[in-house]
Image: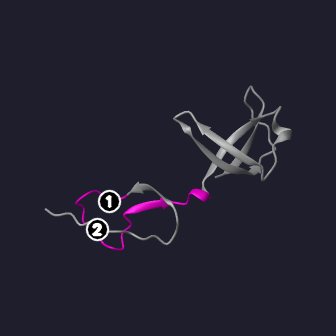
Amino acid sequence: MRWLSLDVAAPIDGVITRVLASRGQKRDRRDATVHPDRPKALEVHATVVEEDFPLVSVGQPVELYFDALPETTVTGKVARIIPERSSESTASYPIVVTL
């Protein structure tokens, strides 16, 4: 059996987050084969402890670090601040960061 490799063009810039077809599977050309996500549309929901809450503002730049990817830094901006204290034992406030 011979495999055919094709270049695929997408109407948006993005990152492939899911492959919806498997090798050798026949697909109609109208069927989606991959699921792209727009990285600039991604959001992180985080919390800020009460002591730091007055220091956070919408539009403020943010750097995110991940234990699983210690060499990687992701940047973003504070998009929203929810001024509602969480009910946890440590007082914190939810924020939304766009990447």
Instruction: From the top left corner, tell me how far across and down residue 85 is, in percent.
Output: 79, 37
Question: Which amino acid does the dot numbered 2 rest on?
Answer: Arg
| Labels 2 and 1: the sequence-earlier one | 1
Quadrant in the picture for residue 26 = bottom left
Image marks 2 and 1: residues in contact by CB distance under 8 Å: yes
Quadrant in the picture for residue 71 = top right
The residue under the point 16% across, 64% down is: 2
Instruction: From the top left corner, tell me how far across and down residue 91 is, in percent.
Output: 78, 30
Residue, disc 1: 21
> Magenta segment, which residues?
20-40
Instruction: From the top left corner, tell me how far across and down residue 44 is, in percent.
Output: 64, 47
Q: Main secondary structure of the magenta part?
A: loop
Q: Secondary structure at mark 2?
A: loop
Residue, disc 2: 27
- Above or below — where is 52 with respect to 15? above
The residue under the point 77% across, 49% down is: 60
The residue under the point 31% across, 68% down is: 6
Residue closest to the eye, 11 or 86:
11
- Above or below — where is 27 with respect to 95? below
The residue under the point 73% across, 42% down is: 94
